[in-house]
Image (spheres, rainbow, N blue to C red):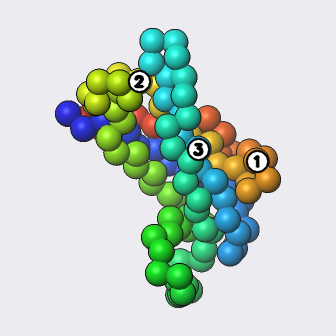
Amino acid sequence: MTGKYQGIIPNTVILTESTWYNLEITAVKDGVGELVSKERCLAVIHSRQYENSENQEINYLFIGSDNLITYNFLTNNQTGEYIEDATVSMTLKTTAGVAVTGATDIALEHIA
C-alpha cells in the first residue's frame, strides 16, 4: 500500500509559457476534505531548454501535452497510515488564485 493517486491535466487546457501556476490537490475521506498539497508549477514548451539558475526542484507543466500528475503517500495525519480509499481531486490555479478553465476538480484515481 502506498497511498498513490494519479490523474491527467489534458492537453486542451490553455497554459501560458513561462507562467507559474499552483496545483492544489484535495482529499475527501469520511465526509471530511482537506488540501493535501499545493505545488508551484511552471508552464513550458517541450522543445525548449530551461535553466534553473537557483538549483531548486521545479515542477513543469508541458504546454500542448497531457500532463500526468502523481501524488504519492497520501497518509492519515494522526496515524501515519496510507489512505487508499479517499476521493482525491486536483485543480490548477493561477498565482492569483483563479481556477484554470478545464483544469478544475480533476479526479485522481488510486493506483494499487
Residue for point 34% across, 32% down: 75
On residue 38, the disc is none
Can I make out residue 47 in this image?
no
Q: Between marks 1 and 3, how big is the CA–CA gap?
A: 10 Å
Q: 70 or 62, which is in the foreground?
A: 70
Residue 79 showing in the rendered view: yes
* Distance of label 2 from label 1 (alpha carbons): 25 Å
Viewport quadrant of the N terminus: top left
Residue at image position (60%, 77%) is: 45
Query: In the rendered view of the protein, which quadrant contains the C terminus?
Result: top left
Q: Say whether residue 79 is left or right of residue 35.
A: left
Residue at label 2?
86
Query: Relative to 50, is 69 on the left or the right?
Result: left
Q: Secondary structure at mark 1?
A: loop
The disc label shown at residue 24, or none: 3
Residue to which mark 1 is pinned: 97
Question: Residue 47 location, x and y as percent?
Answer: 54, 84
Q: Secondary structure at mark 2?
A: loop
Classify mark 3: helix, strand or loop: strand
